[in-house]
C-alpha cells in the first residue's frame, strides 16, 4: 500500500513538473512583453511592474505584425485548401483506382514519405532557383506554392490512411450505376472523409503558419510572414526584448486559440471518418 502511494506521488510530481516545464516559457514570454525596455533587459528578474500594453501597439503598428498576420493567414489558408483539393484525388487514385498493393501505389507512398522527411535546407536552393526564374521570389506567391506542395503531401498521407480500407465494392457499384471517377469521388468518397479533411486543414494551416526557413528566403518587405517579422526584432545593434516578446505573443495567440477551439474536431477527424 505504501509503495503504491509512493508511486502515485511520483507520477503526480512528474506530471506537475512537466506542466511547469511547458507553461513557464509562456508565462515568461507574456510577463516580459508587459515590461518596459529597461525592465525586460534587466539581468535580475523584475517581479513587480506596471504593465506596458504599448509594447503590443508598437509591435503591431511599427513592427509590421499587422501586415504579416494578413500575409500568414492568406498563405496558410490558401495552401491548406489547395492541399486538400489536390491531395484527395491523389489518395483516391492510389487506393481505389490502383490496387493498394500495386507497385505504383507503393512508389507513390515511398516518394511522399521521402519528400516529407527531406530537411528544408536541402531543398531550399532548388526551390529558390526555380521560382526565381519565373519571378516568384520576394513575394508571397512563391511561398504559397512551396507550402501548398507540403500541404498536398500531408493530405495524401492522411487521406490514404482513410481510403486504404474503404470498401471497393462501393466504388464498383457507383461505376455500374454510370458514375465516372470524379462523380464517384464526390458522391461516395467525399461524404466519408469530412473528418479527415478537417484534420488536414488544421494541420496544414499550423504547418504553414509556423514555417520559417522558406518564408525567410522567399519573402521580403511587405510580404513577410509572422515568424520572419518576429525574427526582424533581433538585430546586431540591440534587441528590444519587450517589443520582441509582444510580437511573439501576438503571433502565437491566434494559432493557440484556433488549436484550443478545434482540438476536439481534429481528434475526431483523425480517429473517425472512414466507413465503419
Image: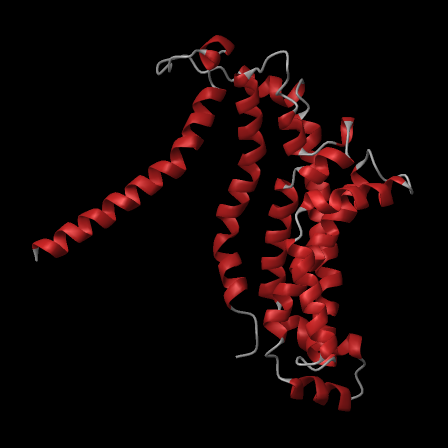
**Residue at 55% over, 15% down:** 54
Q: Considering only vertical position in the picture, is 95 above or below 84?
A: below
Residue sitting at the far right: 134
In which quadrant of the rendered image does the N terminus lie?
bottom left
Does residue 185 appear in the picture of this structure? no
User: Is 8 positioned to the left or the right of 62 in the image?
Assistant: left
Residue displayed at 37% across by 37% down? 21
Residue at x 52% of width, y 52% of height: 262
The spot of residue 147 in percent (x, y) is 72, 48
Q: Position of residue 46 (x, y in %)?
A: 38, 14
Which residue, as the protein is rendered here, is positioned at the far left?
Answer: 1
Which x, y percent locates residue 115?
Answer: 69, 57
Q: Quadrant of residue 101?
A: bottom right
Horizontal side, residue 54 vs residue 35: left or right:
right
Of residues 24 and 169, the one drawn nearer to the viewer in this rendering: 24
Measured as percent of width and height from the top left, residue 34 is found at 47, 19
Which residue lies most toward the top here? 38
When asked about the image quadrant of residue 24, the answer is top left
Q: Is residue 142 above or below residue 200?
A: above
Q: Is residue 79 visible?
A: yes
Q: Residue at x 55, y 45 (%)?
A: 258
Amino acid at each position: 500500500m505504501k509503495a503504491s502511494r509512493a508511486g502515485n506521488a511520483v507520477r503526480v510530481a512528474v506530471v506537475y513538473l512537466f506542466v511547469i516545464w511547458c507553461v513557464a516559457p509562456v508565462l515568461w514570454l507574456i510577463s516580459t512583453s508587459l515590461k518596459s525596455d529597461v525592465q525586460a533587459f534587466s539581468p535580475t528578474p523584475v517581479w513587480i511592474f506596471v504593465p506596458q500594453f504599448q509594447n503590443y501597439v508598437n509591435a503591431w503598428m511599427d513592427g509590421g505584425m499587422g501586415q504579416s498576420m494578413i500575409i500568414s493567414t492568406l498563405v496558410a489558408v490558401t495552401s491548406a485548401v489547395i492541399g486538400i483539393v489536390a491531395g484527395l484525388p491523389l489518395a483516391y487514385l492510389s487506393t481505389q483506382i490502383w490496387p493498394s498493393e500495386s507497385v505504383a501505389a507503393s512508389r507513390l507512398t515511398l516518394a511522399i514519405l521521402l519528400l516529407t522527411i527531406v530537411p528544408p535546407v536541402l531543398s531550399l536552393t532548388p526551390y529558390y532557383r526555380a521560382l526565381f526564374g519565373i519571378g516568384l521570389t520576394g513575394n508571397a506567391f512563391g511561398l504559397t506554392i512551396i507550402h501548398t506542395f507540403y500541404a498536398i503531401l500531408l493530405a495524401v498521407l492522411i487521406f490514404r490512411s482513410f481510403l486504404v480500407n474503404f470498401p471497393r465494392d462501393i466504388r464498383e457499384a457507383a461505376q455500374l450505376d454510370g458514375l465516372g471517377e470524379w462523380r464517384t469521388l464526390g458522391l461516395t468518397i467525399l461524404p466519408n472523409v469530412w473528418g479527415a479533411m478537417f484534420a488536414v486543414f488544421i494541420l496544414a494551416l499550423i504547418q504553414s503558419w509556423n514555417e520559417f526557413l522558406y518564408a525567410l528566403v522567399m519573402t521580403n518587405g511587405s510580404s513577410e510572414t509572422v515568424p520572419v517579422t518576429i525574427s526582424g526584432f533581433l538585430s546586431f545593434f540591440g534587441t528590444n526584448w519587450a517589443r520582441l516578446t509582444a510580437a511573439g505573443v501576438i503571433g502565437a495567440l491566434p494559432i493557440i486559440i484556433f488549436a484550443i477551439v478545434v482540438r476536439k474536431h481534429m481528434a475526431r477527424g483523425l480517429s473517425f471518418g472512414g466507413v465503419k
